[in-house]
Amino acid sequence: MNKNPNKAIRIWLVIGLLSYIALPWYAIQDTAWYSVLPQIMGGAETANGLVQAIVHGRKWLLLGLIGMVVAAAGLSMPPGRKQSNWFLAGGVIGFAGLLVSGFLIGAKGWSFELFNAQFGELAKNQFGIGIGAFIALLSLVMITAFGVARRGYFKGDLFVASAVLGCTVLLVLFIAFPVTKALYGAFLNEEGQWSITAIFSRIGNERVWGLNCLAGGVRCGVAWNTLFLALLTATSTTILGTMMALMAERSAGPRIQTPLRVVALLPIITPPFVVGLGLILLFGRAGIVNQFLEYAFGIPPTRWFYGVLGVWVAQTFAFTPIAFMIMRGVVQGVAPSLEEAAQTLRADRKKTFFTITLPLLKPGLANAFLVGFIESIADFGNPVVVGGQYSVLSTDIFFAIVGAQYDQGRAASLAWILTMFALLVFAAQRALLGKQNYTTVSGKGDAGIAMTLPDGVRRTLNAVVYPWLAFTVIVYLFAFAGGFVQTWGRDYTLTLNHFKTAFALEWGQFGLVWAGTAWNSLLTTIKLAGLSAPMTAAVGLLIAYLLARTEFRGQGLFEFAALLAFAIPGTVLGVSYILAFNVPPVELTGTGLIIVLCFMFRNLPVGVRAGTAAFKQLDKSLDEASLMLRASTAQTLFKVVLPLLKPALVAALVYSFVRAMTTVSAVIFLVTAENELATTYIIGRVGNGDYGVALAYCTVLIILMSLAIALIQFLVGERKLGRRKAAAPSIAVAAH
């Protein structure tokens, strides 16, 4: 079928060899790698890999070249097991040799002393890997993957083998490795020595597992508080998100759909604390509701809203849009022909909805619940703002790290509990879905009209969704009014001074001057978020494709690793990146790249879950037909499957971009003066009590992100399933 089965391997060998010759090997400090290309034959910092090994004495770098030469020797053999041995040997020798020697440098312990003694100062002074080393390692991973495929794994498919191995390396390096390094602290005692009992002494107490609230006490332990809140939030967000998706796709008319989607997505493009602030202005001790109750009924103001109620409402606001985006694609994918078949067999609309339509939504419901649960347990912003005395694990972890007593061991121990909770829900989801088939989009034509919702369901949607959307608008009106008044609570004079402070433009001697104090953080945030979003969506959907369309050993562990970043609170993830990437060989701390990578892998699970739910609905016969027509797996993915995944692609792009624009916890320890982000600027203003400028900045961010979402939707487009628009509800009712 393939006239040149070794073409891809030759290409990667050439790329690997060029990375040794044409690019700087190490990361360049304080400048871009391409600015030193004329100096790649020169100094110890700017030289290419070949010069580094031969001229500057870093002989361990030759391991990568040796691996490539060994792999190249296999090209003379016919495809098969013997050739695979050469590819595997070359790839493993090169990749493992470079990576292991890199991690040995500067490490402590008897097993590392020989290496460091052999190379002396050369080992101690090695820099972090740069563009040349990265491309060389990537080519060696691809060569190893080709060896695995030639051995017969993954049905001999080079693309699938490369994708699985490449994604595994990314997940291990940027999720499992830093998280493991951070969680390892749970097993270190106060003297820094290994102790298996250290974690139990930190978390085996009343503060974590107490059940006093069930026996008339004041509060339960933070672990039970977290679990109860997460289950509550996941349930409410899944129900509300599903209702909004059903209304948007099945009930609302064309004039209502666009405003409904805009308002439904508004909370997801909101910077931190804005929803909490709006809720406080409404329900806080000095809020409008308490003032009205005191004025009308003489009820003195209290802090009734602070606690589990306030956190639940705030989290429901924050995470319902994620469920809506996941469920909207799933609702679109339900085949009208299945509903028409049920009605042909004399089932009414109500029975059809509950026996056909709703069961077909199970993959989306399970994924939306899982994401809502993990988002809730990892969130600390909302509990801090409106949690009051209701403590959860994420806030305890946050204060263990940034509090007066820095206690990484306690933070790591509590993070283990969050990881276990996420693992349990993940296992429950897999057990619920099992091996059931939810395919609704096949290669057959399906131009049917989607069934009109039953009257009772439609009335329920109207009674729940419209009041919730109105409530959303009210909260935002109160929150953002603060950006247009002089001083909230004292001087309500309308003003634009807060916007001028942040985003003033002036004409100077050399032209336009960005005089506002917020321009630097805004432009940096847009640049880094714009870089991370497409990478997040691409890797997320690729992993979803591998999980849905291939079977391989360790697939469950592979899937959990992709979700692990959500199970870890953002603060812990940020600290783990500092601990893992502060020294060679992967030295990223202080750069914009570490922020991009943190954005990417923190937001990766939404792309994976949205893609997985969408793939569950696509018939595998579409892939098989394409492959039978001699298309490669890559061609099938990009030309057949990807156009049917547009809702999942939009969800991944939108979510990853706006979360990168608004996240705080994961990057609060990674930002520098050079790479200040919008959220850190806002937090600084809030800390100084300058709420007007902070809310003005939030208003600008929301406008920008709304435009970005519209642009993403325009560029990606809508999925074309060849279906006709549903008739108006009144006509459908008359027909029955």
Image (tube, helix red, strand yellow):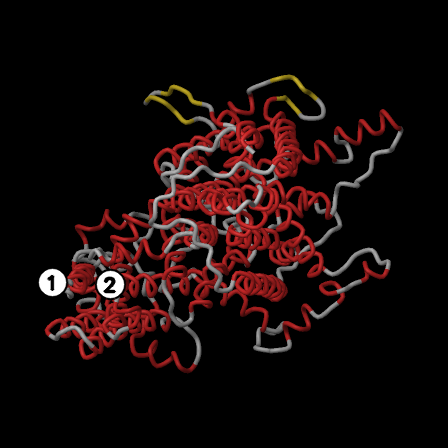
Label 2 is placed on what type of residue? Ser
Q: Residues within 10 Å of mark 1 (few under 14, many from 20)?
A: few
Residue 673 rendering spot, x and y as whole percentages: 46, 43
Whether residue 106 is situated above or below residue 444 in the rendered picture: below
Instruction: Estimate the spatial distance between the alpha carbons at disc 1 and disc 2, rounded to whole Å.
Output: 22 Å
Q: Quadrant of the C terminus?
A: top right
Q: Callout 2: few (<14), some (14-19), or many (20+) C-alpha neighbours within 10 Å? A: many
Report x, y in % for residue 675: 43, 43
Q: Amino acid at mark 1?
A: Lys
**Is residue 100 something one can see in this rendering?**
yes
Q: Position of residue 539 (x, y in %)?
A: 37, 54
Q: Nearer the viewer, residue 156 or 667?
A: 156
Callout 1: helix, strand or loop?
loop
Query: Mark 1 or 2, which is nearer the eye?
Result: 1
- Tags 1 and 2 touching, CB below 8 Å: no
For the residue pair 629 and 35, the one nearer the viewer reads as 629
Residue 578, position as x, y percentages in the image? 47, 58
Secondary structure under tag 2 reads helix
The residue at the far right in this view is 298
* Residue 602 in sight: no
Viewer-proximal residue among 617 and 373 = 617
Numbered tag placed on residue 139 in the rendering: 2
The residue that label 1 is drawn on is 3
The mark tally for this picture is 2
Dividing the picture into quadrants, the one containing residue 696 is: top right
For this view, does 183 lie left or right of residue 167? Answer: right
Residue drawn at the location 41% of the way across and 56% of the way down: 544
The tag earlier along the polypeptide, 1 or 2, is 1
The front one of 392 and 7 is 7
